[in-house]
Amino acid sequence: MKTHDHFLLSNTVVTTVCVAGVSPATLPIEGETPSTHAGQRHCVTLNHAPAFTRSSLLKLNHNRGFTLVEMVLVLGIIALLVGAGIVSLIGVLDTGKATRVKGDLNTLSAALRAYETENMFLPTTEQGVNALVERPSSNPAPPNWRPFLKKLILDPWGNPYKYRRPGVKDKGGYDLYSSGPDGQDGSADDIGNWQL
């Protein structure tokens, strides 16, 4: 009597062959006929790789990971999402810079009002906003000068704020403005106190 038991252990099939009345030394190997011994049962365990068919290999490979097409598709979707995020972030940054310029202009305008209150006049165009940080050496010299700002403020693009007195946009007072991202005076992207 011959029985076969099969177990699959991590890509290796373990087969146990048991034969009644046959000693392990006399089990058939390549067509030999075993000698029989009454009442005895002998078992031999054989380890061998499983026999895979092409379809079973494809199923195993499919379950193991992602295909190249799937990976390219996922990476493409991620690239599109990142690109869309960067484009929307650029718009937010530009809006944030314009908002910061308006805040800086309010700070400089308040300092200029304090300068005018203490000295009874505003700085000249030549003295500029630098008169709020350093005592002007040119006339008219302020009689009650003190620092109105701790340091000179630069716009978000790294340029100093411009000051004109009398103003071109605000004829009765002064123009205080940033020349914007292009750094050119009089262009459409200038942001000034006339817009506040």
Image: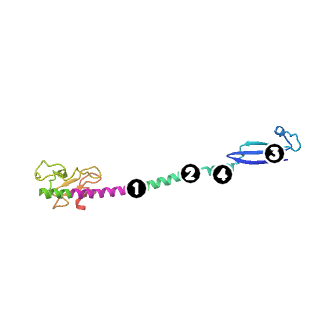
Between tags 3 and 4, which lies in front?
A: 3
Q: Earlier in the sequence, mark 3 or mark 2?
A: 3
Mark 2 and mark 4: Cα distance apart in space: 17 Å
Mark 1 and mark 4: Cα distance apart in space: 42 Å
Mark 3 and mark 2: Cα distance apart in space: 49 Å
Mark 2 and mark 1: Cα distance apart in space: 27 Å
Give the residue number, with chain letter if any, for mark 1. 87
Between tags 1 and 4, which lies in front?
A: 4
Q: Quadrant of residue 28?
A: top right
Q: Tell me the element at label 2.
A: helix
Q: Tell me the element at label 1.
A: helix
- Image coordinates of residue 108 in percent, x first then y, are 22, 56
Q: Earlier in the sequence, mark 3 or mark 4?
A: 3
Between tags 1 and 3, which lies in front?
A: 3
Give the residue number, with chain letter if any, for mark 3. 18
Which residue is painted at 19% across and 56% down in the image?
A: 111
Whether residue 26 is situated above or below residue 183 in the rendered picture: above
Give the residue number, with chain letter if any, for mark 4. 59
